[in-house]
Image: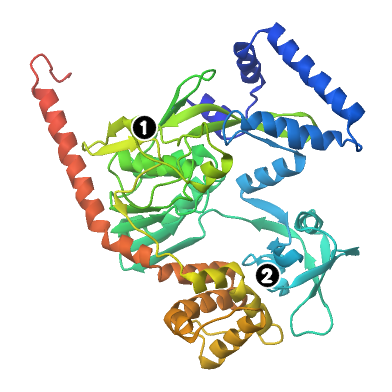
Amino acid sequence: MNSTPRLALLSLTAAIGALFLSSAAAAQSDEDLRSSVKKFTQLYQAVEANFADKVDADRLVYRGAIPGMLRTLDPHSNFFDAKAWQILREGQAGHYYGVGMLVGQPEGKVLVLYPFQGSPAYRAGLHPGDRIIAVDDRDATKLNVSDVSALLKAPRGTKARIVVRREGNVEPLIFGVVRDEVPRGSVNHTFWIRPGIAYMKVDAFNETTGHEVDAALAKFGESSIEGLVLDLRNNPGGLVNEAVNVADHFLHKGQTIVSHHGRASAEAKFTARKGERGPEYPIVVLVDRGSASASEILAGALQDHDRAWIMGENTFGKGLVQAPFPLSGNAALLLTIAHYYTPSGRLIQREYANRSFYEYYSRLEGKNNPKDLRKTDSGRVVYGGDGIAPDERYETPKLDTLEETLQGRLGFFYFAAEYFGNRPATLSKDWRPDEAVMSSFRAFLTKRGAVIEDKEWARDRPWIEDRLRDEFFITAFSKEESEQFALQHDPEVLKAVDSLPASKALLQKAKEVVASKTAKKSSTPGVAEAR
């Protein structure tokens, strides 16, 4: 594998100023460029001199001119100011320093959504639903969620004084929290679904994902794995080189994982450098519309080489490569410089010209490109143009009206906050809501303006009980443990286990086809084995 483009384009660390200059030079002549800049300067001066109100220069340029220019290119080229760029880099690093909790602003109030398991906030006893009213000596009641998040982050070892209001308590609660490193791993759920069948969920691809996957498989004891469910649902992507590292674990040495090239960037091909780092057990990969970019690279590589059975729904369809261009003031530009292609040569990028960003991101359209027909190693037909199409479709049951209402109003979240407001946050692992809890929940919903018919309540009661259990477990245990419990009972995960024989058959067929091709090649007149 050529390591130079890998570092320059994918790990977001190398200098790429020369690439930017060459790209600009290729785009237009110096005279055209000067003319365009002159027109923009004249327009800006006219606005600054004559607009009815005082002009905020940063807002005009950074939130107006630059994003507007980038939107004419593609949906994924983006500008990041210093704050946004720092947040993005922290996410890619897989850790940051702070108190370790997710905060949000539903209904206009900054609340703790949940603390991360094992974090300083978790150990201190902060609960989901706690309203943050002060951080240190700063009144937080009129701040937005970004401002409060900034107050909570500070160097390791510094102390934060967090004041919250909790349901059921007359007086505010005060927590002294010592900031520390907060790991944000990308492989947070691994367990045995049944003897010999392992489950692993990859939430994103950050700087540690490849190592996390290797460590998880080693912890299972890879020789004991008879089948693997690899969950990439709602994985938005991240660092492509980490998706390459994960694919390398499952593919044969020398097999292509992904390639990319653009107008001003040289073609680069990424192949498995090590390969075959474990037994060749069957794999079912779960994907959905939220699986994008690097997760599509992994799914596409495993599908094209018939190494895994893909299950779920079409992935998002992002086949564009962005490279970072550092700007003054610690800002950065992420610019699309190339398209990436799966091993069979598919471009999975969906069409984005002549449609709004809303149409693109909401996926109102999307279809396979019949001109981009390719074949996997065993000869199966696959298409580009609309993400990775699954080998087996799984349609998640749609919510009915009551279920949508309860989810949309955060009824479970607010009820759990009220329930544990003045109760100990302890439950048994086999806890389910009893009749008293269910009656209290329905009364709580009615108080918040929900109108629920008896037949609706009876019909959806099992679903409501499951969601209440999941929400209560976040406070009683942790967000991570609640998610893992839900995944262990996820119908799609269990269906994936049933589909492992299809993956095994796919592996066998691919081996037979490759063996047949090898035999034909060796028997062709004029072809002899070199000794």
Tell how many labels.
2
Q: Position of residue 298 (x, y in %)?
A: 41, 42
* Residue to which mark 1 is pinned: 346
Height in image: 499 above or below 237? below
| Residue 335 placement: quadrant | top right
Quarter location, residue 300: top left
In percent of the image, x 31 and y 63: which residue is there? 495
Quarter of the rendering occupied by the N terminus = top left
Residue at position x 57%, y 74% in the image: 471
Dot 1 or dot 2, earlier in sequence: 2
- The foreground one among 157 and 233 is 233
Left or right: 112, with 358 as reference point: right
Which residue ends up furthest to the bottom in the rendered image?
436
Q: From the viewer's perspective, is 395 left or right of 323?
A: left
SS state under label 1: loop
- Residue shown at 76%/44% (left/top)? 83
Amino acid type at circle 1 is Arg
Q: Is residue 252 visible?
A: no
Q: Residue 297: horizontal and vertical position, in percent?
A: 43, 39
Q: Amino acid at mark 2?
A: Tyr
**Residue receiving disc 2:** 122
Left or right of residue 99: residue 301: left
